[in-house]
Amino acid sequence: MNVWSSENHCVSAPFELQGLSPHGKARSSILDRQKVQNQPTHRTHQVHSFILIMRLMMSWWSCLVVVFLLQASHGTSGSAYYITASEPLFPNQTLVSSGKIFELGFFTPNGSANQYVGIWYKNLAPPKIVWVANRELPLVYPDPSAKLMIGSDGNLKLVDGKQNIFWSTNATSRSNYRSAALLDNGNFVLQDANYSKLWGSFDDPTDTLLPGMKMGVNARTGEKLYLISWRSDSDPSPGRFLTGITSETPPQPFTWNGSTPYWRGGQWDKSKFIGIKNMVRLYSSAIKVEQDIQQGTTYLSIDSLEQTYTYMSVLPGGLLKIMYWDDGAKVWLALWAGPNNTCETYGTCGPFGVCNSMSLPICRCLNGFVPKSNEEWNSGNWTGGCVRETELYCQKNMSTSASTIVKKDAFWQMSRMKLPDSEDYLSDIGDQEGCLSWCQSNCSCLAYSYVSTIGCMVWTKENLIDLEEFSTAGENLFVRVAHVKTGGSSQKAVVISLSTVAGILFFAVFVFGLCKWRAKKRGKPEKLGKLLQGNAWKEQLKEDDALELTVFSFDSILLATNKFSTTSKLGQGGFGSVYKGKMNDGKEVAVKRLSSSSAQGVQEFENEIVLISKLQHRNLVKLIGCCNEGDEKILVYEYLPNKSLDSFLFDSKKKAELKWGKRFQIIEGIARGLLYLHRDSCLRVIHRDLKVSNILLDEKMNPKISDFGLARMFEGTQILVNTHKIVGTFGYMSPEYAMGGIFSEGSDVYSFGVLLLEIVSGRKNSALYDQGCLNLLSYVSAKFQP
């Protein structure tokens, strides 16, 4: 409501009653004629006078009330739908989108003395900040006189109480009237009187990409739209990591650490990025790339999944995630994250090195290459890469004719590959034969690949970098090697062929024998050490103390879960899905199928196998077996009919079953399990993800700690450990871990304290934001303050 228009309306009423309105003369004439015709008495005059006075008083009273409310609106909290020149936004107000999906306002990160203006999802807890205006120049908290306003030049300005400008737009328009609104897609727009957009927050992204936004480049205008991470989880200022898409053909997504590549998604083949495994099956529908070579534009955008909220964000540590909102569980879940393992980090194995996360060691040199430094390579530092063992003949004899070059050098085929970086795209070559011919005729060509949905790509730079070998999918890469490395003479070719045939026959006999042996042994225990391919704890476990573990075939898991049917599904989390199964012996089990887009990778999978197999306690969940076939990573647990603690604690009906005695029993059981992990077990383990959903309940409501994928084992003398990969659940993390990556037994104790408060209060740790508290600890702390 406009203050001036309201005041004019209030003031005009009394004057109209006094006959001073534009129609006053006509009204006076009518009254005069009525007086002559009716000849009113003295009493009639008194009644008319009384009515006139009462109307006058009521009009002035209404005007005073309206003016008071308008003036008081700046001092009370509330929501608005527009910002105008006369109606700024103050720290105790928020701007809400029409559908109440997004909200804009002032916020202060936890543990910070700075104040920012940002946008977040309304009514979702914990709040996800998707855009920040003044990330480079924060206000000092508190400043109740600060405001977001439209200045005299028609631009949005964020000013403090002294009218110092902390952020502003730079839009030009002839329109005198401007307003700002928050749209339901999360775009904060400055618009003119015709609602034409003059500026939008979508054109100035921070660390998050929403559906409808785009990131990319415009070579003609010089526009560059990148995602830039926060400096830390409590500091929105620009961090070290930047995510964008290149303008080359085909384009590639990158995350850079400063100017150094940190992660690369591979070439776009018009439907997916070929460097991201399993993209078609999992999330290709969420990502779109539009490239117009004539206009010089390349943009990447995302779509919402199945009518749910979706966003892409780059975290302070460099992890790029696509998240979606699970409305049933009321949590954000990861659809995909990268880099998801060491091999996905850019250039892990250096030039001419190839990475395979399923091998040990994970790096090896390409055929025809050897480590540049054996000492570094053997110590696990592979970034120096590899060098050619034998120089190419075409490099020795640059004057040699093309036909001779073909005889001297050859191309080694590598399958299921993430293609290397820095390719050249040959748009005028339309088939693989043409691609090979071009590469044969050019000694500078180190490798080539022909992808039907892209075309011919060749590599002519100094080296091949960021190569990864997948277990499934991937592309064919043909690497140029000296001919001697592929067989050289006919005699060597015969020897190699005979060796290959003998090897294949031996392998076939071995596989046949193995299948027969597995058929007899199926369902029987297998040594733990034989299952794992590179566990971080493997060397620390005594070989003679390795436990027996049942290894199930994937077919038996399919049978037990009715092919992972929806009727068997017990729940879903960021790791994947959990199903109820029934084995051949009739035993009921819980089957945890890790999603390939899960934040839990090979290391976490092996962690859980080792730790739960090694640890035995009545308050720890029991692992029955596992399955590790191809990309399938499955864990089989004992089935606990009462599911997780949160299904009782936060359910309006079921929570009545948790009497005080039962709650105390659950708290005591969790404490006993935690004490066993820290002090009484053969391994000293820090769980790192202790939360209410990771506490399972058996038929007698006894608690069992579960999900050891993020756990770490301590050496006996260690007290603190520092990590650059901060994992877990915010709200349960201790401050020193969440902010500095330092964890210890105290980290689990802190999480246990949060868990204890949830059990006692019956409140979710993240459900108190609307009450002015960031979490349950802030809420409880406020209750104890004098």
Image: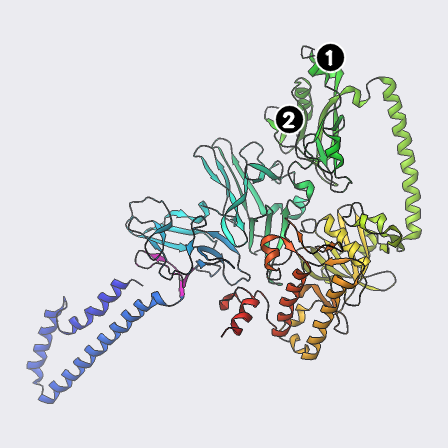
Residue at the spot x=49%, y=67% of the render? 772
Q: Is residue 541 visible?
A: yes
Q: Which residue is mark 2?
A: 459
Instruction: Determine which of the numbered discs, if any, sits on residue 765 in the image.
Output: none
- Please determine whether, in this image, residue 121 is positioned above or below residue 503: below
Q: Which residues are magenta?
A: 78-95
- Front position in the image: 264 or 107: 107
Residue at left 89%, top 37%?
Answer: 507
- Image coordinates of residue 252 in percent, x first then y, are 58, 36
> Residue 255's x, y, as percent?
58, 41
Q: Is residue 79 magenta?
A: yes
User: Which comes sooner in the sequence, label 1 or label 2?
Assistant: 1
Q: Quadrant of residue 59?
A: bottom left
Q: Which mark is residue 404?
A: 1
323 horizontally vs 25: left or right: right
Left-right relation of 518 to 4: right
Q: Position of residue 412 (x, y in %)?
A: 75, 26
Asked whether residue 562 is in view, the answer is: no
The type of residue carrying mark 2 is Trp
Foreground: 139 or 15? Answer: 139
User: Of the residues shown, which amino acid type is indicated by label 1?
Assistant: Thr
Left or right: 75, with 482 as reference point: left
Of the pair 278 and 613, the residue shown nearer to us: 613
Q: Secondary structure at mark 1?
A: helix
The local crowd at label 2, few if under 14, some if 14 to 19, many if 20 or more residues have their Cα within 10 Å, is: many
